[in-house]
Image: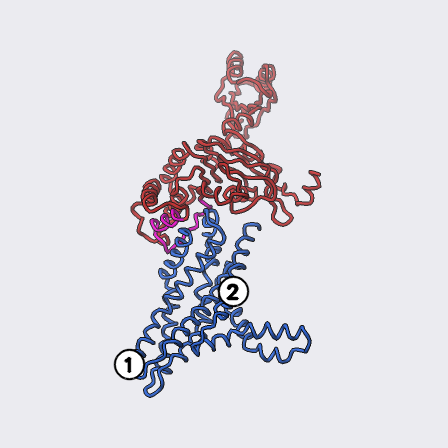
Chain colours: A red, B blue
């Protein structure tokens, strides 16, 4: 539904986005992640048609955002960050206004406004001025405005910003529901949110696309080298050497880091180990536990460290913080 | 067309929902009413609204920038320009709609002053000439809509409403000053074709001469075309400014 092809955008001499390409199909929630200045907002602006790319193309449906901008914009429902609204209007009035902008006739508009008010839990405040509403309600008005013309593409920038925990839960549920027959792109800083609702994640850093895949795939990929945390009872002198020998003797075993535990832990008679498997090694928990048990060792804890999306994200953006090349340099590099 | 009316309607509604809109109307009517009571409603004098139209023209100077300053500036400041520019609305549609909303507000502000000629028609003997009254209102509308076009352009340049107000005020003032001093400048021009061209431009640029004609009841098509052309020029500039925002 959305095709982004090799888009570049620079502000003055600084590249905001360079060579980003991806396709967004219908029926999937795609999360757009990235640190501040990664190019997320610029990418969203290019998709929503408020900013043209310097190079490359964005196609929404069958409409190029440069050549058929109006047609492309007709297909998109957009919730900008912090949901800017006309404070003197009522939610209902604003939704009718948005409906008119998207060409809905009176009958269709009435029905659409009712649906949007209901979807976003705004019925009780429909006649109140937006300026008197809380931040959470305003966010919901912005969301309702993005939905009112029933667009096939939804672009939501920080959709749960300012909502309370119940509303966050409900909004995530709504996003999942909306995605069944739409293309849905969400930009957020809340990584756990993306982990929960996104089918796919795009990670931008330094204006380039650093990762593209399902959250589970990205985590799996980052977990190529599994790490195990192990606590073993130290009963006798030389037990640590014994444990080290057993662990190093196991197949597929990589690095073994003994005595990482702090002094207090050691005094209590437990030694802490951080053990790494070789790249592509199977789960080693069973073999570690079994071999230590056979040697008469008491194992207090044995767990495989799980990598969160946050860690994947941090690893991916590591080193890209200064990757905002000047236009001339980047052009020189590509030439 | 539906979009034009939607944006114009929203703009107009906002002006009437905010205290600023009512304050502008109230101040204008207060001053216009004072002029009517003090300079026109005088027993024994011929019934004419000439002074009212002359003063009203000057009253537009602070009033119109106050109407126009928020048209685009407020959208830029509050960020509402983003959902507006990502809706399927062309830049021309946006500018025409904003302009239309502001023009209707201006007409709504002038509408209560129709009571003044009505009063004169009811109580004055002999009754005032209808021609200068109609041409006087036409002059006010043409001046007001021209100033609004300048204000809309100024408003598209900045997110700061105060700056937009001052830009509009000084632009109008500059044009009026140029218009008033035009003949003097023209006289001081050297001979030759350059001097002739400048003299020609300055004389055709005179707003005060045209307003004078209107106040005498003369409705010259060239005057209407003059104001319409200048208004269109500033609307084009506003569209170009909005378009350039997309390319920044």
Bounds of the magenta segment? A79-100
Q: Which mark is residue A63?
A: none
**Can you say whether B47 is above or below A210 in the image?**
below
B162 and A52: which is toward the camera: A52
Q: Position of residue A256 (x, y in %)?
A: 60, 22
A126 and B33: which is toward the camera: B33
Instruction: Evaluate whether residue A237 shows in this view.
Output: no
- Specify the subunit that label 1 lies on: B
Q: Name the residue that disc number 1 marks.
A: B123
Q: Position of residue B118 (x, y in %)?
A: 31, 75
Query: Left or right of B22: which side holds A316?
Result: right
Q: Name the residue that disc number 2 marks.
A: B229
Residue B183 colored magenta? Answer: no
B167 and A187: which is toward the camera: B167
Secondary structure category for the residue under label 2: helix
Query: Left or right of B116: which side holds A35?
Result: right
Q: Position of residue B47 (x, y in %)?
A: 35, 82
The residue at the point 36 percent across, 52 percent down is A130
Residue A80 colored magenta? Answer: yes
Secondary structure category for the residue under label 1: helix
């Amino acid at each position: 539904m959305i095709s982004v092809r090799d888009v570049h955008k620079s502000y003055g001499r600084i590249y905001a986005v360079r060579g980003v390409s991806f396709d967004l199909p219908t029926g999937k929630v795609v999360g757009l992640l990235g640190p501040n200045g990664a190019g997320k907002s610029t990418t969203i602006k290019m998709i929503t048609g408020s900013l043209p790319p310097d190079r490359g193309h964005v196609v929404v449906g069958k409409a190029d955002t440069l050549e058929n901008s109006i047609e492309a914009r007709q297909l998109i429902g957009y919730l900008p960050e912090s949901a800017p609204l006309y404070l003197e209007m009522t939610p209902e009035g604003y939704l009718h206004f948005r409906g008119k902008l998207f060409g809905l006739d009176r009958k269709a508009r009435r029905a659409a406004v009712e649906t949007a008010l209901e979807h976003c839990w705004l019925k009780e405040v429909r006649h109140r001025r937006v300026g008197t509403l809380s931040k959470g309600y305003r966010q919901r008005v912005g969301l309702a405005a993005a939905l009112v013309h029933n667009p096939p593409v939804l672009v939501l920038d920080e959709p749960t910003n300012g909502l309370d925990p119940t509303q966050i839960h409900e909004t995530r549920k709504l996003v999942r529901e909306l995605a069944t027959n739409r293309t849905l792109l969400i930009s957020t800083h809340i990584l756990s949110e993306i982990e929960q609702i996104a089918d796919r994640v795009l990670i931008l850093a330094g204006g380039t696309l650093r990762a593209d895949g399902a959250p589970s795939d990205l985590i799996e990929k980052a977990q190529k080298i599994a790490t195990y945390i192990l606590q073993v009872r130290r009963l006798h002198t030389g037990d640590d050497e014994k444990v080290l020998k057993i662990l190093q003797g196991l197949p597929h075993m990589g690095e073994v880091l003994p005595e990482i535990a702090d002094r207090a832990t050691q005094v209590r008679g437990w030694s802490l180990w951080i053990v790494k498997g070789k790249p592509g090694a199977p789960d080693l928990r069973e073999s570690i536990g079994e071999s230590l048990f056979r040697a008469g060792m008491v194992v207090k804890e044995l767990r495989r460290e799980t990598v969160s999306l946050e860690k994947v994200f941090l690893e991916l953006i590591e080193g890209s913080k200064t990757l905002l090349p000047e236009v001339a340099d980047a052009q020189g590099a590509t030439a | 067309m539906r979009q034009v009316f939607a944006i114009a309607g929203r703009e107009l509604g906002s002006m009437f929902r905010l205290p600023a809109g009512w304050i502008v109307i109230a101040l204008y009517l207060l001053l216009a009413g004072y002029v009517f009571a003090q300079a026109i409603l005088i027993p024994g004098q011929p019934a004419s609204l000439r002074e009212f139209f002359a003063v009203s023209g000057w009253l537009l100077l602070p009033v119109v920038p106050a109407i126009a300053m928020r048209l685009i500036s407020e959208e830029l400041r509050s960020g509402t320009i983003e959902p507006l520019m990502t809706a399927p609305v062309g830049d021309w549609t946006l500018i025409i709609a904003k302009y239309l909303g502001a023009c209707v507000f201006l007409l709504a502000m002038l509408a209560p002053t129709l009571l003044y000629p009505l009063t004169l028609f009811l109580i004055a003997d002999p009754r005032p000439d209808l021609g200068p009254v109609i041409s006087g209102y036409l002059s006010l509308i043409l001046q007001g809509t021209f100033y609004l076009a300048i204000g809309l352009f100024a408003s598209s340049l900045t997110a700061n409403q105060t700056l937009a107000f001052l830009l509009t005020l000084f632009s109008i003032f500059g044009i009026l000053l140029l218009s008033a001093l035009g003949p003097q400048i023209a006289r001081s021009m050297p001979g030759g074709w350059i001097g002739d061209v400048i003299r020609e431009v300055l004389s055709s640029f005179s707003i005060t001469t045209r307003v004078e004609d209107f106040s005498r009841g003369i409705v010259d098509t060239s005057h209407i075309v003059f104001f319409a052309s200048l208004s269109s020029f500033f609307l084009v500039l506003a569209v170009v400014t909005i378009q350039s925002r997309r390319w920044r």
